[in-house]
Image: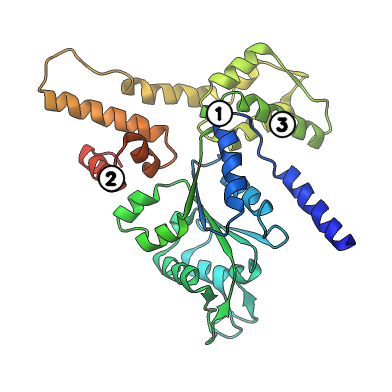
Amino acid sequence: IKSDNRLNKNIESLLEAKKIIGDSTPMQELKEHIIKYAKSDANILVNGASGTGKELVAWNIHLNSKRKYENFVPINCGSIPGELLESELFGYQKGSFTGAGANKQGLFEIADHGTLFLDEVAELPHSAQVKLLRVIQEGEIEKIGRTTKISVNVRIIAATNKDLVSLVGEGKFREDLYYRLNVVPIDVVPLKYRGDDILLLFNHFLEYFSIDFEINKPTLDDEAEKVLLNYKWPGNVRELRNVVQRLVLNSNGTITAKEISNPMILRNHRMNIENKNLDTMNFDKVVPLKEIEKEFRTKYIKYVKGISSSDSSAAEKLGLAPSNFYRMCKELGLK
């Protein structure tokens, strides 16, 4: 009983530490999906731009699942060279190659009965994609240098900031693996669409870094709040966290709009220049209808892609099959 209580307290502590902050409609829906999908063992694909908190979503799914007392094992598939990635995932036997001086457990073994989080799954080399598909299908891994297979029971949560449907169309990602991973898709929206969550997150990080740096928590003036809410946050929650850390370090007690604008203004200016021509269409001269239709379709599809976490999500918004959407984008020169 004491052991169970200790485990429960550990889970409660982790849930608090990994809490998803936000009350906006997209975040309420996300939290509902997490609780719902945590109950099953189905593989999940988390789609979202860099810095939106995809690993945090994966942690919350794990901590609300029946696997919560087992290991949560994360790996960034884009940060490990392809030739080393398979050794990390599947392990190897002593003496199986030069430098293999001891047996190595792979991450699948470490995650047995728990959850394996594959971040940046689009970066998996083809050979690793083939082996991953086999593990999902058979529930067994083949260690390098070992003749017998090892059974594993692992729930896979994958994440990507790229559109896997497009990569499948380009032959860069296996279609069969995509469907095996995308049993349950979850989209994490960019921070700019989360409204007042920006202020909630700002205050959360403000408190965190004030405690960390052992200083009094700075206050935020009204104009500063407007700057925070009007900024587009291209780096999402990760960028906001870094901005708050910088502000707390340099704070004199009150954070002003001018202070907040400092680290962001150049990026804002550049974004405004880049987007300026997307908001208007040129009607200075009469052109064939086909040309103006193409111009409108290009700009509208580009807009929908911009507010969607993936091309498959954009296709759904437009009422198009993914294959038709991909073909249309190709015709219009949109990648």
- Residue at the left extreme, as displayed: 288
Figure quadrant of the C terminus: top left
Task: Read off the residue under disc 2.
Answer: 326
Mark 1 or 3: in front is: 1
Residue 16 image-quadrant placement: top right
Mark 3 or 2: in front is: 2
Within 10 angstroms of label 3, few (less than 14), some, or many (20 or more) residues?
some
Task: Read off the residue under disc 3.
Answer: 204
332 displayed left or right of 54: left
Figure quadrant of the N terminus: bottom right
Q: Is mark 1 on a helix, strand or loop?
A: loop
Q: Which residue is drawn at 36% across and 39% down?
A: 316
Residue 214 image-quadrant placement: top right
* Res. 119 visible in picture: no
- Residue at the right extreme, as displayed: 2
1 displayed left or right of 122: right
Badges 3 and 2: C-beta atoms under 8 Å apart?
no
How much space separates mark 1 and mark 3, taking CA atoms?
A: 15 Å
Which sits earlier in the primary sequence, circle 1 or circle 2? 1
How much space separates mark 1 and mark 2, taking CA atoms?
A: 28 Å
Q: Nearer the viewer, residue 185 or 335?
A: 185
Q: Is mark 2 on a helix, strand or loop?
A: helix
Q: Mark 2 belongs to which amino acid? A: Tyr
Question: Residue 334 location in percent, x, y?
Answer: 28, 39
Question: Residue 292 location in percent, x, y?
Answer: 17, 24
Q: Residue at x 56, y 46 (%)?
A: 54
Question: Residue 115 location in percent, x, y?
Answer: 62, 60
Which sits earlier in the primary sequence, circle 1 or circle 3? 1
Colour mode? rainbow
Task: Read off the residue under disc 1.
Answer: 194
Q: Which residue is drawn at 78% across and 48% down?
A: 12
Q: Is mark 3 on a helix, strand or loop?
A: helix
